[in-house]
Structures are given as C-alpha cells and as structure tokens.
Image: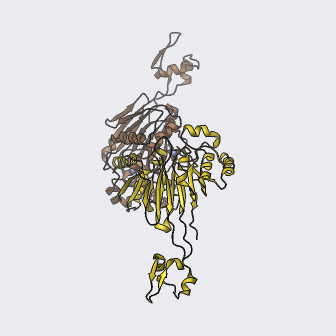
Chain colours: A yellow, B brown
C-alpha cells in the first residue's frame, strides 16, 4: 500500500500546503486508488502526482468541513471527463449526498459513471477477501470519523526446495497449490499447502483519522497500527488554541500513538501559521515522545510494505 | 481598470490553465476588486497574484457550469477567514444562491460578512456615479450571460494656467472647483468649471462574456468596447466541435469583435487540447481578421487606461 499526501494543510490553502486529501494506492493488490477527503483543488494537486482519477474507486470523507469536501464536485466531474466509467463508492456523513447531488444538478453535470453513496453508520464499512475497512468516531464538534484499513493475512511464499523434494516442477501448478489448502495432483499425490509454504504473511494496518481532539477512546481500535495518520493542527505551545478549535497538537498525537503501540506516526493537517523551522523544532520534541515521527508534506508518498 | 486573468482554461483544469475566473481591479477608483466567475481553485491562483480576497466586493457569475462556480464555497470561506467583513454582492443565475447556501450550510461555514444575492433579471445590474454594469444574454445551452462595464465620462483636468489668469492659487479650492459645475468664491467671483478644465475624459467600456456560440445579436451591446473578452474554446479547424459544444472558435470571436468595432480583443476559455505552438499558429490567422488580438494566460494582467 502506498499513501500519497495530496493536501496536508488545515482550514485554508496556502502556497505550501493544500487543504485535506490523501490517496491510498493499492495498484498491485487491486488496481485501485482510494481517496480520503477531498478539499478544494485536490484534482489540481493530483495533476502533479502519479494518481489517475479514473482509478479512484472509493472516496472516504472524514467530516463535512469545507476544507475536506469542497473539491468533490470538480473531482467527480473530471473523473468523468477523463473516461472514468466504473462505479464510484463514496463513504461519508449523510449530508454529503445532498451536497454532491445538488452541486452536480445545478451545474448540469452528467457523469458517465454511477455513484454509490454509503453512510458511515456501522463499524465495518467494507470487507472482501483481502481487506477490511472500519470506521471510528472522533471528537471534533461536528461528526468526524477515522478509517482503519486492515489487510488480511495472506498465505506464505511457496518453498521451491520443498516442492522439488515432492517432485513438482515449476509451472501453473504452483499457483494452484498456493490457491488451495489441499490439492490432489494427476498422479494421485495430495499436497497440503502448509507443507510447501513459508510462514503466513501478516496484513498491515493503516489508521487514517479526520480532524479531532486527542481521545483515548480510540486507542483500542487503532492499537498496533503499522501506520497512524493523525492530525496535528497546532504545535504543543498552542495547546489552548487546539482545544478551542477541537484540534490536536503534535505532542498529543504522539502520546496517543505511543499508548496505542503504533509503529509509524505521520502528523497531518498542519496550520499554515507555522514556518518550516517551527516545525523542525517541534519535531525534535515530538521525537522525544515517539521516535521516527514525521510531518506529512504535500505530494510526499509513504509506502507500507508487507513483509516477506 | 486592471484585468487579471485568474483561470483561462475550459472545462477541466490543466497544469497551464485553471478553470474560469478573472478579476477587475478598480483600486484607484474605488478600492474594490470585482470577480467574474469562480472555478475551482480560484482562491489558490489568487495566492499567486496581488489580489486580496477581502477587497472583492462583487462577484459576477456568467453561468452555472462547474468550471465557473465550484471555487465559490472555498473562496467565500477564505474571504471570511482572511478578515473580510464588508458585504459581498453576488450576481448570478437563480440556482447559484441555492448552491452557495447549501455548501455553506452542510460545511457549517459561518461567514463574518453578509452576502447579498442579486439575480440577473434586468439589463442594468448596477449603477453609481462612476460606473454602470449591464448584462446581456448569450447562447450556450444553459442560460449564460455577458457583463458590460461602462465607466462614466469624467470632468477634464484642471488647467493651471487658466486658474492663474483668474487669480486662483493652488489649494483645496482646486478640488471644490472640480467637483462643481459652478462655484462662487469668497471674493464674489463666479467660476464655471468648463472654463478652467480640459476636455471631458471618456469612460472606458469593457465587455466580459461567458461561454457562448458566436452570436451577432450582441453586437449592438458590445459596440465600441475598449476591451472585449470573448471565449475561444476551439481553434477554427474545430468549428464543428465548437458548434456541438455550444462554444466559439478564435476566428468567430475575432469576426464578431471586428463587426462590433472593438479596440482590443482577448481570447479566453481555451481548451487544453491545444499546445502553445498550436495557439501561436492560430493567432497568426486571427490577426489577419483583427490585428492585435491575444490569447489570455493565467495570471496575466491587462490595463485599460483612461486617457488624459
Ligand atoms: Zn480540517
Ligand atoms: Zn466553461
């Protein structure tokens, strides 16, 4: 899985950081891109990335603030213009449907693909053989959500030496063996997959959160995430402001990530009031709490690699 | 008056041309900026210009297509965030109000200034002592409008020699004389303004059109414009496409401008299908019809100077 940060600012766009959006690319696994939030000019930022709008198959919206949704009407139109014809699923708060439908209607935009609206009313939003997506409720004045993407564990690699010992030569049969727990060969021999494959490959867990106050209630849900993307609108000096505006500080995010045993924390949704050197200094303090933490930057890509 | 082209593309944004918007700055005359159309990321483009969102006092929307309106919710929010507190007038088709109100409502955006919606239902949209703004109907499938901004003629410059002859010394009295057709001085002398000022300074006429097929019906209204901004989505080779999509070609725009005795034509709303060298070649042909014509470019500024 690859995360591309499209817009990492907060509230209003600045020259350095656009308003919120990020893309989760799963091109190898499923040839799809999932988008999380879609602030104004998300489609413009995408022009400077490798993402193709027609590959976007699902959009998840954390909450209804303008800096997270005002890019949707334009992106949906352009996806159509650029020959996107496959259905698009949009997961978001209930009023999102109203906003999108009215925007398309007044502008007489006729999309070449269907939109399937899904409201965030259950814990499990989506599940198939490879992945499960759950939502969790945050604290932000308006209903705000986080999304947890968990890859399912997968069968270990085939062990060529073991296969050789059993007299099986490389060929399409290899894939058949990998796809079945047990298979009987033409010569009558029965192969148990567990005998010829390495250890199970653990799926990765990525937690992408919307705007929120720090809240310990989510620790259980995000526990052991390989990657946590948490907002850090303010530096810790501005803790009072963060509280007033229902946001978190960098240190609060790091403390939470530490309690949740998160392997990598990336700080997102950064106020434009801070200069680069402010953030560099802040990061030193954050790393005392949780080493390796970084600030997201527009168009930066982070790869979550499955082991093995 | 200064025109800044903010977005000069058509339909969808490209790396070179954003979707539609342009600003008319009248900072000397009235310390105001008027915006014409507001496609997505207009506020982002403005970050790279000299325009201050809080100086925008009126927004005129030519028609409801997404590439002309999807930047409004974000721009309105940012104007508020950037301490815009003065009322904002928005002139547009009736459904515009619905789109803006719903966008602000679902996103829980609370502006620090009032919006005054004005629908384009009369020929004269606005008039004061300096300027008059008229609308005219175009041909574009959906209701599309053009806007004609006419400065009123103003009093000629004071002639210092004439004033000297009459024994009047420079001072605040000069402005009083300029402001009144006739004034009686403390010494009983009566001054007629026309005796001490140069020729009347003609106001300028600027015509800014939305998307349209070429239509001779507008010639009378735009006649003698000092500046005409006309769409040229297609080159003349693609005349059939232009007709299919309710747009104009460069040559069609130039022919119309010539018939309307326009002094300067600027071609706008250019499809991203054309490369720079295509447009250079096209411009040679256009200039055979109407010399001096140019293509608009994003962030290019054109000044319409009053004489004298
Ligand atoms: Zn936000
Ligand atoms: Zn257009």
Residue at 53% in and 34% down: B83
- Foreground pick, B280 / B107: B107
Which residue occupies the extreme bottom position in the image?
A187
Image quarter where the C terminus of chain A lies is bottom right
Residue A298 placed where, x, y %? 57, 53
Q: Is residue B131 above or below residue B270?
A: above
Residue at 57% in and 16% down: B167
Q: Is residue A97 visible?
A: yes
Residue A36 placed where, x, y %? 48, 54
- Foreground pick, B262 / A149: A149
Residue B164 placed where, x, y %? 57, 19
Q: How many marks?
A: 0
Q: Is residue B300 visible?
A: no
- In the visual, does B240 lie left or right of A148? left
Residue B173 placed where, x, y %? 54, 18
- In the visual, does B270 lie left or right of A19? left
Q: Quadrant of residue A245?
A: top right
- Foreground pick, B239 / A4: A4
Residue at 63% in and 43% down: A235
């Amino acid at each position: 899985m690859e995360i591309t940060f499209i817009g990492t600012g907060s509230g209003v766009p600045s020259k350095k950081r656009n308003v919120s959006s990020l893309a989760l690319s799963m091109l190898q696994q499923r040839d799809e891109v999932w988008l999380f939030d879609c602030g104004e000019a998300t489609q413009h930022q995408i022009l400077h990335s490798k993402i193709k709008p027609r590959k976007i198959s699902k959009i998840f919206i954390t909450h209804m603030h303008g800096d997270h949704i005002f890019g949707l009407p334009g992106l949906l139109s352009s996806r159509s213009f650029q020959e996107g014809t496959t259905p698009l699923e949009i997961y978001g708060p209930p009023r999102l449907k109203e906003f999108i439908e009215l925007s398309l209607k007044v502008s007489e935009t006729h999309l070449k693909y269907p939109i399937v609206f899904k409201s965030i009313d259950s814990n499990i939003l989506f599940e198939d053989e490879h992945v499960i997506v759950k939502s969790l409720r945050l604290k932000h004045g308006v209903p705000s959500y986080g999304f947890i993407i968990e890859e399912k564990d997968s069968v270990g690699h085939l062990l060529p030496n073991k296969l050789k010992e059993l007299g099986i030569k490389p060929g399409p049969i290899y894939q058949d063996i990998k796809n079945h727990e047990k298979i009987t060969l033409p010569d009558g021999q029965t192969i148990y997959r567990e005998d010829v494959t390495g250890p199970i490959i653990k799926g990765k867990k990525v937690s992408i959160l919307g705007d929120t106050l720090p809240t310990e209630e989510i620790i259980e849900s995000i526990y052991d995430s390989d990657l946590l993307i948490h907002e850090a609108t303010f530096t810790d000096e501005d803790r009072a402001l963060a509280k007033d505006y229902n946001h978190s500080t960098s240190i609060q995010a790091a403390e939470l990530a530490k309690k949740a045993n998160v392997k990598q924390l990336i700080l997102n949704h950064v106020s434009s009031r801070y200069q680069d050197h402010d953030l560099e200094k802040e990061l030193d303090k954050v790393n005392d709490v949780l080493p390796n933490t970084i600030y997201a930057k527009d168009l930066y890509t982070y790869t979550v690699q499955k082991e093995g």
